[in-house]
């Protein structure tokens, strides 16, 4: 006997079917909707796994989240990891600084000089040369 049984209201079922039919929805969200629709029809976890090509843990987790949270279970949860050091506006300013003339006595900007400049301009409380490298790589900038 399953601990988390999916019991859909007519509104919930209509919402899930609309999500599955619509083409402009995130793939993970559509997969979760399909899992819930299968589960509401009485399919076992192993049948859902075989039909949708997802893992057993995904099916169990989706069932549990639906019972606990309702349709909110379809949405992504925040992912772990540190927040970004620089805002998009600060990143643009960093790229502009990297493209400007090098400081006096230097031939070109180094990653560490740019990191120091970011802090000097007040774009961030602290900034490492690695952060500068990632921003410049993302924008396809060259210090030369």
Image (cartoon, rainbow, N blue to C red):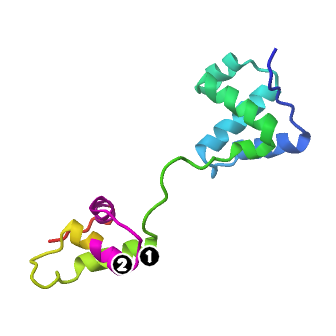
As displayed, is residue 95 above or below residue 7?
below
User: Is residue 85 toward the left or the right of residue 110 in the image?
Assistant: right
Q: Position of residue 122 (x, y in %)?
A: 40, 79
Instruction: Indicate the quadrant where residue 5 lies.
Output: top right
Instruction: Identify the disc placed on residue 75.
Output: none
Dot 1: within a 10 Å radius of its alpha carbon, few (fewer than 14), some, or many (20 or more) residues? few
Callout 1 touching callout 2 (CB < 8 Å): yes
Instruction: State the residue at coordinates (40%, 76%).
Output: 123
Whole-percent x, y for residue 115 in the image? 29, 69
Q: Which residue is mark 1?
A: 89
Q: Is residue 8 magenta?
A: no
Range of magenta residues: 116-137
Q: Is residue 118 highlighted in magenta?
A: yes
Which image quarter holds the N terminus? top right
The residue at which mark 2 appears reads as: 93
Report helix, strand or loop for mark 1: helix
**Picture quarter with the C terminus:** bottom left
Which quarter of the picture shows residue 128?
Answer: bottom left
Magenta stretch secondary structure, dominant: helix
Comparing 85 with 50, the one in front is 85
The residue sitting at the top extreme is 1
Image side of residue 117 versus residue 75, left or right = left
């Amino acid at each position: 006997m399953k601990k988390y049984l999916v019991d859909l209201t007519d509104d919930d079922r209509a919402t899930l079917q609309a999500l599955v039919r619509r083409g402009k929805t995130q793939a993970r969200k559509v997969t979760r909707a399909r899992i819930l629709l299968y589960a509401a029809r009485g399919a076992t976890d192993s049948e859902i796994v075989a039909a949708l090509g997802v893992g057993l843990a995904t099916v169990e987790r989706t069932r549990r989240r639906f019972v606990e949270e309702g349709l909110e279970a379809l949405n992504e949860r925040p992912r772990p990891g540190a927040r970004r050091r620089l805002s998009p506006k600060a990143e643009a300013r960093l790229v502009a600084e990297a493209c400007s003339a090098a400081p006096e006595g230097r031939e070109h900007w180094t990653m560490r000089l740019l990191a120091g400049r970011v802090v000097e301009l007040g774009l961030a409380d602290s900034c490492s040369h690695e952060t500068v490298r990632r921003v410049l790589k993302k924008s396809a900038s060259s210090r030369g």
